[in-house]
Amino acid sequence: MAQTLHIESRGGRVGTPLLEVQNLVMHYGTKEGEVSAVDNVSFTLNNGEAIGLVGESGCGKTSVALTLLRLLPDNSVIKGGDIKLDGESLIDLDEEQMRRRRWRDISMVFQGAMNSWNPVYRIGDQIREALRLHWPETLTYQEETDRIGALFELVGLNPVTMERYPHEFSGGMRQRAVIAMALSCNPKVIIADEPTTALDVIVQDQILRELKKIQQELGMSIIYISHDIAVIAEVTERMGVMYAGKLVELGSTLEVFHRPRHPYSYLLLSSTPSITGPRRKLAPLEGEPPNLLNPPTGCRFHPRCPFAIDKCSSEEPGLVEVGEGHSVACWNWQEVPEIGGLQK
Amino acid sequence: MLKYIAKRFGQIFILFYVFLALLFLLLDLQPGDISQQFVGNPNIPPEAKEIMVRQLGLDQPKIVQLGNHLWNYSFGMDMGVSWSSYPREVSDILFSALPRTVFLFLTATVMSFWLGFYTGKLVAWRRGTFIEKSAMVTSIFFWTVFYPWFAILMLWFFASQLGWFPIGKFISVEKWIGAPYAADDVFMLMLGTIALVTLVYGVARYVIDRSSDDPQTRRNFHRLALWSLAGIAGAFWAFSARRTYAGDILWHTFVPVLTLTLVNFAGTTLLTRSSMLETLREDYILTARAKGVPERTIRDRHAARNAMLPVTTSLVLQLAVVIAGGVITEQIFSWPGLGRALLGAITAEDIPVAMGALALIGILSLLAHLVADITYAFLDPRIRVQG
Amino acid sequence: MADILTPPTERLDGFDPSAVLEEPLWRIRLRLSWRSFRKNWALFSDNKMGIVGILIIALFGIMALAHPVLMATVWQDHLEGGKNVYDIRAGADSIIVTKTIVEEVTDPVTQISQIEAMFLGTGVSIPEIGDTIEAPLANPAPPVLSGVDHPHILGTDPFGGDVFSQLLFGARAAFLLGAIAALSSVALATLVGTIAAYFGGVIDTLLMRLADLVILIPLLPLLIVVSGFWNVELTMLGILIGVLGGLGGTAIILKSQALSVKVKPFIDAARIAGGGHWRIITRHIIPNVLPLSFLYMMFAVTGAIFTEAALSFLGLLNIQQSWGIMINIAHTQGYTLEGLDVWWLMLPAGLSITLFSAGFFLVGRAMDEVVNPRLRKR
Ligand SMILES: Nc1ncnc2c1ncn2[C@@H]1O[C@H](COP(=O)(O)OP(=O)(O)OP(=O)(O)O)[C@@H](O)[C@H]1O
Ligand code: SF4
Ligand SMILES: [Mg+2]
């Protein structure tokens, strides 16, 4: 009884590596050609840690998340790299084995989670479905109901509302219920893709704060994905910055905010007023993100980069360590000025 | 839910009267005015003329005539007397044809819906495969095929070429000579059996759903209920003395029902396919995949269940096709239903029967509309729970 | 790519605004619509089925044009008893003779099979072997590909009419009817839809309830009654089908499209600029509804052809010649169960109706994917 009510993370000892992504390359095949949506992305998620991925719309954040769960559309190809969960490669699993891992080991809160609910089934029954599929023992109906009730309480919903249909929930309630569903099978990792984008600012804030609380209390490992740098700042300990399918900077959130080393991170941060105080019009981010059908040669940022040097258009920079756990892919990172840090 | 149904019911009720008024207008507009036509027509027996005068109140103002017309067609249940087979009452002629039309219409609709939905679902799921492409070409062929021609081909193939089935008609007269039962009675008993089985199954489902929370148990019991009911009904007919007669009727229904089903099923397939393709792009399908739901379950319980909603609505728009198909089927297969009565009446210039048949077909279409609306309300919790 | 690096002000250098204004407005419009046409064509031609549809329609177009041309040239001098053998009505007044019902027909001039007799009969009683029955003298002649004295490449109908000539003429009738029905239906639907959407309120409610009613009326039975009361010919039928179709489902769909246009900012702008209701409707809303209207025109053709052919088949229309009438003649003259043995009687006409409908249906579906992006592959 108590076991079924226990909501926890099934990950290992806090601080040890849980999810290791190595040199991941993923393309979409389209009629016009190959879209290189994820290019050579590597990062590690430790147990009990919250990390973030930021970047402009279309830079491939959702694609990374979908690749981790192997939920990609038919026209996609994983060209290389590896994803290891607790040391075991997910790429090598066959489809049936992968299906058993989904939600049980890695669950996901989707971009636009408002539409994540099937309109014809009750909210509670949709969570029940996940429990039936993945809970190691067979639960009685009452045990399932009790667990869903406990999950609802955890995310701040009244358990009696589990009998309702999605259309009877407000956007915020649906979002909370999605989080409850993501927690339902005690996963090791939760991926939250734009978990609050569709909500108004106040609800957004409430939910983020609750998420953070749950994450810290349960020792949950979460990957947050957002184009909104403020969200990432609020809830993560480490973060990666993506540009045009590549991870261009990776480091602790505090440090990246304090001293971004990549020109793109710098421009992104300095053009976001809510974090760094009044907007400093040092060098606004001009131009448009590149077409991933044929990305620019060399550094993919060079057509828009105010710090670009000759080499940038021909040679591609690799990720290099520039500080304690802080790496960046830029030829000219030394020139990027300090920004002043995070005012929390 | 009840409010919604009541509202739809009210609307349909009003529409019914507007439709009847429209029929009156049609009668009134026809060349030479109905009174002249029927006074001048030498084929009409004088008794029929008197009845017409009384019924339409032709000496009274138009508005009173309209009122009489509406009353006679609804509460009066009086549609006048046939001109061509005097002195039979129109309602007598039509009500004996009605069950046969309803049977043809219902079996073909239910079967084509079921088949079409199933195929459409599979076809959408296997998008891009050879199976999908050939199924699409077949569906488009059936959807656009000139139905009378196709029906003639079916008749030729099954009745003349293979010789497996009769050349149309409702019964083989020679088999019924000296039969202790009237064909219509046996037929009504057959319809009654089907209705009873459906009703009992519905009640059983309701009871089962109330008494168990577990979907799997429920599904097993649903199946058990269906099979045992079908078994009981089958046994009843197998031991009944009416067996051979019922068999004869069934034998005659086969080709018409198959023909009508084939054509309508293509429409449902096409509709289901596009509805299913749209549903498959919904976010909740991705969520279900992320939840590790097996693919078959995603297809059947998540995608198809939602894809069914727009298909149910569009079914109403397809109704016109089904009705047109029904009229033509009855004509080609000499199936004595409403459509054939209508065509016969038009050829014989029997206006009361023609109007009555048109009115009844209109009512059938209204009822079908209502049924589709109620089904939709049941399927969609957004209406079931709130409306 | 390099262009992005140039500051916008520099890019404006050498740009002469008057150069653009010198170009007349209609040419700009033309160029813009040509461009959007090319884009849509690219989307359309993705769909193989749509191309097949266009080819089918083109084939029938050629057939329809061929008939008058052939009549005026190659077929001109084939007279037989003072009548052109290719005239679509040639032999329509066939000779009726008395035939004996036999089991096996050995002499088609004096004998007839039981099954054929059944279809000729009143249907009241089953014709017995040995009875006599009134039946047309002529029999359909099989196709002959060569030969000057019998030049019917698709054979003749039971009355001696040339099937090929009738087939070509039928294409003309089909286009005429389809065009009348589709144009009137969609014109009406567009008007009703935009007016309902633009004015809203009572007008909207009335028009939409009317549409509900029209959807509910069983079209074919109604037309059967109408054609029993009145003498319906092709143009009249086209308009009738058009009006009934245009007030129903299409009007509702076009209304929702018009509604989505009505809330766009440029409509407000036009209103503020002092545009009258009529001007806003015709200049701003209708042009944006038009692509969808055009799409429904294709489906309207399919429906109209079916209805005409079905009514012709039932022998209820007063039209000269059509594919439906060809099947009707074969059917009423007792060739229903001969099936493919006399294939030229029903197969060409039946296939033509089917293919003609399919052609427009396929084009409609392919256009649907252009107009309605949700249906596209990705
Ligand atoms: N199924 C697909 N086929 C082809 N290209 C695709 C497909 N899905 C995404 N893309 C392309 O891949 C790139 C990355 O898309 P992705 O959805 O991962 O971006 P994102 O960073 O999540 O953006 P957003 O913030 O808007 O969600 C985009 O350029 C997109 O156009
Ligand atoms: S490598 Fe060059 S172009 Fe790329 S970000 Fe660094 S400085 Fe800019
Ligand atoms: Mg995304």
Image (cartoon, coloured by chain):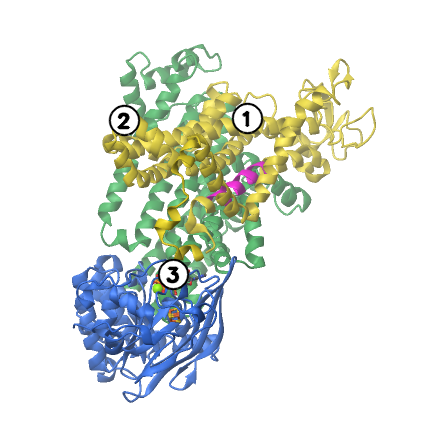
Q: Which mark is residue B168?
A: none
Q: Residues within 10 Å of mark 1 (few under 14, many from 20)?
A: some
Q: Check the residue under mark 2 and report the chain it is in.
A: C
Establish if C356 lies above or below B79.
below
For marks 1 and 2 on the same chain, the one whose residue lies earlier in the sequence: 1
Q: Is residue B94 left or right of residue A254?
A: right
Q: Which mark is residue C176?
A: 1
- Residue B339 picture location, percent across and down: 48, 33
> Tell me, what hue is chain C?
yellow
Magenta region: C355-368
Mark 3 vs mark 1: in front? 3
Amino acid under label 3? Pro
Q: Quadrant of residue C328?
A: top right
* Relative depth, front residue between C19 and B282: C19
Q: Which mark is residue C276?
A: 2
Q: Secondary structure at mark 1?
A: helix
Q: Quadrant of residue C61?
A: top right
How far is disc 3 from disc 2 in space, using C-alphas? 43 Å
Q: Secondary structure at mark 3?
A: loop
Q: Main secondary structure of the magenta part?
A: helix
Q: Check the residue under mark 1 and report the chain it is in.
A: C
- Residue C43 picture location, percent across and down: 50, 47
How far is disc 1 from disc 2 in space, using C-alphas? 36 Å
Q: Would residue A63 be visible to someone looking at this image?
A: yes
| Chain with colour blue in the figure | A
> Tell me, what hue is chain B?
green
* Relative depth, front residue between B337 and C148: C148
